[in-house]
Image (spheres, rainbow, N blue to C red):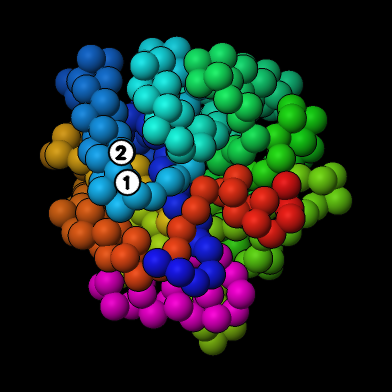
């Protein structure tokens, strides 16, 4: 599909590990072996879908996955996708002080580069957890050798993430780091998120398609982000969580593959790194 380039990304993490910051996970659901299987099976499903569509994507991968599952990281890199960093473990950035954050980011970057054999130039914080309280993380990323970050949601109403008033367009900051914000539609003075995760699951495809077209008309890229548990057949169903949490976590999972396939048929996508090269932002 021709047209303005959009950016396709996946955050490679285990569902249970990624849930710990959001709610208490009962002990009976915690299993390293089960989590490895979930990541392996579901990420393989992602790779198969991308092959069918002849599409490349950016994979933001936890450093610990490079240590535990090096063959999977090599497979992702070997199929021509961009390997980027999602931190060492899935913990929100505001849970680290500056010294620990620097060490964590450096260790994760080194592990991913050693395993993939590729230079890692991109970063995304778990749960988009670079907010107004820890903008110092941008300097740590630049000093650690990253060229771009994709952690900011330019919204001001979410209970976990968001930087109200932040630009909606990719841009180079004063320290040289490029920020690729998550997709939003500016409606009635508010930035409305769309294009990834729960928003892609929740919105009907016709609305998502309309918002992508509108964003491209503005000259901005849409950024898709998804997770293995949203794309594969292995999903841990936690019965003990609240109905609201179940809705936020599981609603619309069965629709994701079809919605993503339709996006890939209707719009042009590339990796984050290649987008920067196309726009001379690298």
Where residue 97 sits in the image (x, y, percent)? Answer: 69, 27
Where residue 169 sits in the image (x, y, percent)? Answer: 65, 65
Q: Are marks 2 and 1 in contact (CB under 8 Å)?
A: yes
Q: Residue at x 16, y 35 (%)?
A: 234
Figure check: 113 above or below 20: above
Q: CA distance from mark 2 to mark 1?
A: 5 Å
Is residue 192 at all visible to an observer of this figure? no
Instruction: List the residue tagged with mark 1.
Output: 50
Instruction: List the residue tagged with mark 2.
Output: 47
Where residue 226 sits in the image (x, y, percent)? Answer: 37, 48
- The question of residue 37 being in magenta is answered with no
In the image shown, does 171 or 103 lie closer to the viewer?
171
Q: Which residues are magenta?
A: 204-223
Q: Secondary structure at mark 2?
A: helix
Asked whether, in this view, residue 191 is left or right of residue 203, the answer is right
Q: Secondary structure at mark 1?
A: helix
| Quadrant in the rendering for residue 140 | top right
**Which quarter shows the N terminus?**
bottom left
In the image shown, does 229 or 113 lie closer to the viewer?
113
Where residue 263 sits in the image (x, y, percent)? Answer: 33, 65
- The question of residue 218 being in magenta is answered with yes
Figure check: 145 above or below 113: below
| Quadrant in the rendering for residue 70 | top left
| Quadrant in the rendering for residue 37 | top left
């Amino acid at each position: 599909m021709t047209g303005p380039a959009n950016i396709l990304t996946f955050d490679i993490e285990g569902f249970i590990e990624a849930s710990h910051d959001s709610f208490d996970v009962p002990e009976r659901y915690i299993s390293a072996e089960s989590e490895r299987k979930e990541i392996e099976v579901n990420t393989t499903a992602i790779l198969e879908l991308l092959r069918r569509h002849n599409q490349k994507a950016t994979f933001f991968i936890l450093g610990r996955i490079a240590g535990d599952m090096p063959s999977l990281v090599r497979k992702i890199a070997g199929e021509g996708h961009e390997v980027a960093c999602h931190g060492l473990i899935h913990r929100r950035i505001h849970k680290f002080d500056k010294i620990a954050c620097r060490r964590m980011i450096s260790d994760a970057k080194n592990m991913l580069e050693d395993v993939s054999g590729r230079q890692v130039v991109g970063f995304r914080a778990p749960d988009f957890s670079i907010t107004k309280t820890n903008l110092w993380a941008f300097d740590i990323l630049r000093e650690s050798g990253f060229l771009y970050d994709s952690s900011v949601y330019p919204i001001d109403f979410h209970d976990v993430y968001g930087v109200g008033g932040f630009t909606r367009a990719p841009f180079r900051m004063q320290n040289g780091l490029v920020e690729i914000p998550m997709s939003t539609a500016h409606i009635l003075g508010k930035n409305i998120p769309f294009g990834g995760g729960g928003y892609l699951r929740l919105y009907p495809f016709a609305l998502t398609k309309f918002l992508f077209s509108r964003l491209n008309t503005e000259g901005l890229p849409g950024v898709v982000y998804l997770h293995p548990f949203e794309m594969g057949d292995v999903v841990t169903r936690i019965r003990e969580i609240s109905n609201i949490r179940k809705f936020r976590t599981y609603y619309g999972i069965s629709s994701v593959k079809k919605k993503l396939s339709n996006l890939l048929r209707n719009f042009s996508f590339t990796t984050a790194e290649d987008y920067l090269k196309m726009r001379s932002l690298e």
